[in-house]
Image (cartoon, helix red, strand yellow):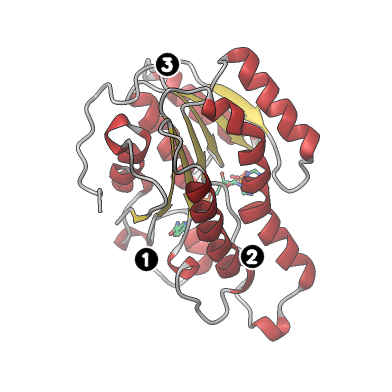
Amino acid sequence: NMRNYEAPADLLKDRVILVTGAGDGIGAATAKTFAAHGATIILLGRTVKKLEAVYDAIEEAGHPTPAIYPMNLLGANLEDYQELAGKLNEAYGRLDGLLHNAGILGSRTPIDQHDEEEWQKVMHVNLTAPFVMTKACLPLLMASKDASLVFTSSGVGRKGRAFWGAYAVSKFGTEGLMETLADELENKKNIRVNAINPGATRTAMRADAYPAEDPKTLPAPEDIMGTYLFLFGHESQGITGKSFDAQ
Ligand code: NDP
């Protein structure tokens, strides 16, 4: 558990890191925190206004200028991912980090009443899109001297829970994808593959899942950055195939 990790101020200096779902919640906090530690961030997400707000905050703070990459993971096809990888290759020639953070909740409902279309949407955004994006970006990650690939899991990705439906199953799949890929890349010394379960965090998704809860009782995204910083910095070199709890 690295929640109390104290990152050196220049931990991510000169690192190029792609963050999905970077416009809101944990993704926005991660993008700003990483930039504050010296990284150049590619802000990927579907709502451009939100990405622009994160971009402006990073610029105003005087941190390395980020890039905005608008993309809806729901409609994106293989060519879109290849185009993403091609543009990143042109601009940076490599990726030192990729955080799969974007996700959707779907509705909490028993399996026997689960809507099939919604099942496919949740599985697509949470599991299939990270798979295809990873596949497209692997050559860029392999071009880095020290690359970190991180997937976002959940408590319900390790132990099933009633009514969490496709969301829970997608997070089990995420853990499986992470472990499978980490095992395949075990002998590659320049890349590590891990997952983070953020734990209950004060975001729109959490409020959607627990409408009766007082958000003030929860840590803000900014409060759970220790594990994120640790996994994207050089001090986690050699750690791979693990699923971390951010809290
Ligand atoms: P938010 O809903 O606050 O943020 C999710 C982000 O993902 C948003 O920026 C959203 O964009 C983006 N996103 C959603 N769908 C798409 C899409 N189709 N294409 C591109 N981007 C998309 O959620 P959190 O910050 O709470 O969650 C972040 C991650 O952490 C998720 O993977 C979630 O499952 C996980 N998690 C969160 C917990 C919590 O307590 N908050 C607990 C356990 C896991 P937009 O703003 O445009 O909607």
Residue 96 rendering spot, x and y as whole percentages: 46, 27
Closer to us: mark 1 or mark 3? 3
Cα distance, mark 1 to mark 3?
35 Å
Q: Helix or strand or loop: what does disc 1 sit on? A: loop
Q: Is residue 241 left or right of residue 134?
A: left
For disc 3, the neighbor class at 10 Å (few under 14, some 14 to 19, many from 20) is some
The Cα–Cα distance between marks 3 and 2, rounded to whole angstroms, is: 35 Å
Question: Above or below — where is 110 with respect to 78?
Answer: below
Picture residue at 60% right of the left edge, 25% below the top: 68
Amino acid type, label 3:
Pro
Question: Residue at left 27%, top 34%?
Answer: 235
Q: Is mark 2 within 8 Å of ligand 1?
A: no
Q: Using residue 169 as the reference point, say whether residue 144 is left or right of it.
A: left
What SS does tag 3 mark? loop
Nearer the observer, 245 or 67: 245
Work out which quarter of the rendered image holds the C terminus and state it.
bottom left
State if disc 1 and disc 2 touch (CB < 8 Å): no
Please rate how many residues cluster around mark 2, counting C-alpha atoms within 10 Å: few if below 14, some from 14 to 19, many from 20: many
> In the rendered image, which residue does mark 2 sit on?
106
Q: Is residue 240 left or right of residue 87?
A: left
Q: Residue furthest bottom?
A: 112
In front of the other: label 2 or label 1? 2
Please state, as top left, top right, bottom left or bottom right, where the N terminus lies in the image. bottom left
Q: Tell which circle, 3 or 2, labels the residue nearer the N-terminal end.
A: 3
Residue 64, which numbered label? 3
Query: Is 88 in front, or is 208?
Result: 88
Residue behind mark 1: 214
